[in-house]
Amino acid sequence: MTGTDIRDVSGACHCGGVGFVAKVDLGSARRCNCSICRMRGAVAVGAKLADFELTRGEDLLTLYTFNTGEAKHYFCRRCGIYTHHQRRSDPTQYGINVACIDGVSPFDFTEVIVNEGVRHPNDGGGGVAGILRYEPTES
């Protein structure tokens, strides 16, 4: 999936306690090489704050921030799954974990751009750090 691909989606964490609906751009799929993104390994797509709605489980969300405290990373406290984060690079957007979107998998994307997050754009860095590729084998 490349280019702009706007879709209305629904999704949830692993245990189903946190649910959401959103209008996302599947063409915006990205990874990041900052410390938290390297560890969680998620592919995220963009959604405007106004286009994201929690439908259940707000009481189950745990907020994690680090370093500048600007990015807000949300996890289900029951199952531990990262569902979304408010972006430091664009606080008007959420990054939504594609693995939490109904009917979408990180393996649907043959190429995912990896953003330079170690040297964050807000700190004078930025750009593309690389491209992550997925090549399925024949089964």
Image (tube, rainbow, N blue to C red):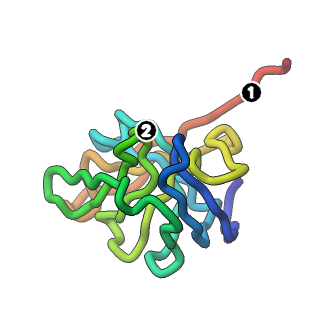
Q: Where is residue 24 in the image (x, y as percent from the top left)?
A: 60, 67
- Element type where label 2 sits in the image: loop
The residue closer to the viewer here, 33 or 125, is 33
Quadrant (top left/top right/bottom left/bottom right) for the C terminus:
top right
Q: Residue furthest left?
A: 67
Q: Position of residue 33 (x, y in %)?
A: 36, 41
Residue drawn at 67 percent across, 52 percent down: 102
The residue closer to the viewer here, 11 or 73, is 11
Query: In the image, 85: left or right of 120?
Result: right
Q: Nearer the viewer, mark 1 or mark 2?
A: 2
Name the amino acid, label 1. Pro
Query: In the image, 15: left or right of 92?
Result: right
Quarter of the figure with residue 45? bottom right
Query: In the image, 138: left or right of 83?
Result: right
The residue closer to the viewer here, 80 or 6, is 80
Name the amino acid, label 2. Cys
Q: Position of residue 126 (x, y in %)?
A: 32, 56
Q: Mark 1 points at which residue?
A: 136
Quote the CA–CA distance across marks 1 and 2: 28 Å
- Element type where label 1 sits in the image: loop
Q: Which residue lies furthest to the top in this view?
A: 139
